[in-house]
Amino acid sequence: MKMKIDSGIPSSTPVTRVAEAPGRPGTIARTTASGAPGDSVEITSLSARLNQLEGVLAGVPVVDGAQVQAIKDAISEGRFQVDSEVVADRLLSSVKELLLQRGAA
């Protein structure tokens, strides 16, 4: 079965060109098909810095591999101790937090 997906929403002003706005560095202006100036967007230094930080964070691992390996070694060597009271307390506090969130929603 084949199905064609069409948004059915025609574009009112097609964008044909994106260029830096004259006289305003860091500002991008778009020109419509008729050549008339359209909207403009200013990219600030803060935005550029956020993009840079996002790239740096993308390279940072979510899990600390050395810590995971240390825990694996402790488990395999029988040195890893589980405190059941701490586990129970944290489980209860997470359930309370979930219940409070559901009550507020």
Image (cartoon, rainbow, N blue to C red):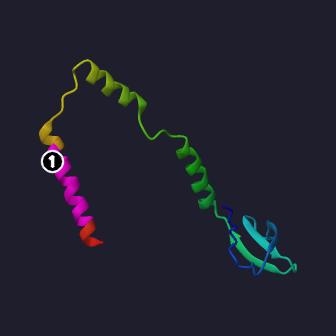
Q: For the C terminus, which image quadrant? A: bottom left
Q: For the N terminus, which image quadrant? A: bottom right
Q: What SS does tag 1 mark?
A: helix
**Is residue 29 found inside the magenta-colored segment of the image?**
no
Range drawn in magenta: 88-101
Q: Position of residue 90 (x, y in %)?
A: 19, 47
Query: How many marks overall?
Result: 1
Residue lying at 79% horizontally and 66% vertically, measured from the top left: 20
Res. 39 image quadrant: bottom right
According to the picture, the residue beneath numbered tag 1 turns out to be 89
Three-letter amino acid code at the position of disc 1: Asp
From the viewer's perspective, is residue 20 above or below residue 86? below
Res. 22 image quadrant: bottom right
As drawn, is 9 to the left or to the right of 50? Answer: right
Residue lying at 56% horizontally and 51% vertically, measured from the top left: 54
Q: Position of residue 13 (x, y in %)?
A: 78, 79
Residue lying at 18% horizontally and 32% vertically, measured from the top left: 82
User: How would you rate the neighbour count of disc 1 (Cα within 10 Å): few for under 14, some for 14-19, many for 20 or more?
Assistant: few
Q: Nearer the viewer, residue 64 or 46?
A: 64
